[in-house]
Structure formats: C-alpha cells, structure tokens
Image (tube, rainbow, N blue to C red):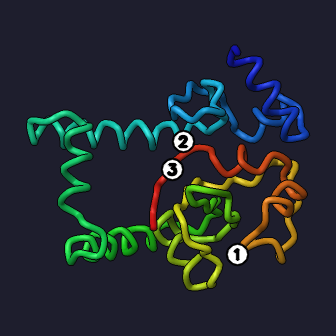
Amino acid sequence: MTAEEFERKYAEDSGITVERLRELGRIVAPCDCGEDYCEGWQSTTAERLAEEEAMRKMELRAAEECGVTVEQLRRKVSEIVEPGSPAWKARRAQILTDELRQPLRWFWLSFADDEQFLGGALIEAHGPMHAMEQSHKLGISPGGECVIAVGDLPPSAVLPDSAKNRLLSEAEIEGYFGRPRRMFARAQKETMQ
C-alpha cells in the first residue's frame, strides 16, 4: 500500500475527505510499530513526529553514553526499575510531576488480557501516566494490560460527554468510532499495569 492509498483509506474510514485531513494538520508517515494490523503507514502530525524523533535521539544519546545499544539500555532500565520498588515509585512520581505541567488533552486507553479485549476509554489527562492514574481514580480500569495513545478525536466523531472518562465496551466504541481495535491501537504505546 502506498502512502496516498493509506491516506485515502484513512480519510474514508474517518468519514471525511483527504483535503479535510490535511486542513486538520494530519500527515502520513512510515510506521514501524510491528503490529499485525499495521499497513506500514500512520496518520499523525508533524509535531508528533518531531516529538518522537527527539525521544529517539535522547534514547540514542543515553545508550551511547553508557556504551550499549538502545535495546540493551531498555532491558537494563527495565531490570533496574522493578515495578513497585522504591526506584519505580520515585520514577513514577517524577513522570507524573512532569506530566502535570503539560496541558490537558485526550488519551485513548485500551485494556486487554491474554484472552480478550476488556474495554477502552477516552480520558482527559496531562500525559499517559496521568491518564492511567485517572482510570484508577475513576474506577474504570478493568485490569490486564493497557495500551495508551494520544487520543485526537477523529474529525467526524461526535462524542457525548457521557462517553468520556468511563469504560466503553467494544460495541459502544464501534458505535462511536467504527473499527475499535484500529482506533485504540495507534501511535505511542505504553504497557502499564
């Protein structure tokens, strides 16, 4: 599939024209997420691409300073920061503090376990960690693993307030947005428990 074909399909799935997508600042860029459903392209914004590139550069710099590959650095960090440990709690507190300085925006949360999709939610928060924290405070986290993505609402979506900040079933998500798994499995992902 070419970038142009992907853009046309994305616009069609969103119920708008390619021109309107472009007016909204959406661009098509290569995607290497590795997900089975991925067609090798993503609809994103230039700002988001710049953020991702800055993160990649920062990660590469840190790996070079430590004399390891990025993959080795990621493994080492996950070994050092054991969930629930004092280091993990301190890091989590620092991330939340940093996120709370950011403006509020919408985040998609998709919950699943090894067997099934457990539900999804559109949560207003300052960042991914804050969104996860909010899901717990609201009592809507059903457990399992959580995939989090910046949740720019599709241009065609009209979402009532009653559908925000609560757990939505697969049927509800499909009613509001169409293909739920595609909507909830985009962009930045973080697995949190």
Q: Position of residue 93 (x, y in %)?
A: 33, 76
Helix, strand or loop for disc 2: helix
Residue at 27% x, 69% y: name it.
Answer: 91
From what the image shows, is residue 181 above or below residue 132? above
Q: Residue at the spot x=84%, y=41% of the render?
A: 14
Q: Amino acid at mark 1?
A: Asn
Evaluate if marks 1 and 3 touch, with contact meaning CB atoms under 8 Å apart: no
**What is the quadrant of residue 61 in the picture?**
top left
The answer for how far apart the CA atoms under marks 1 and 2 are is 25 Å
Graded by Cα atoms within 10 Å as few (under 14), some (14 to 19) or many (20 or more), the crowding at tag 3 reads some
Q: Is residue 164 above or below residue 33?
A: below
Q: Which residue is mark 3?
A: 189
Which amino acid, mark 3? Lys
Disc on res. 165: 1
Relative to 96, is 79 on the left or the right? left
Q: Are marks 1 and 2 in contact (CB under 8 Å)?
A: no
Circle nearer the N terminus (1, 2): 2
Q: Earlier in the sequence, mark 3 or mark 2?
A: 2
Quadrant in the rendering for residue 12: top right
Residue 101 drawn at (x, y percent): 44, 71
Q: Residue furthest top?
A: 2
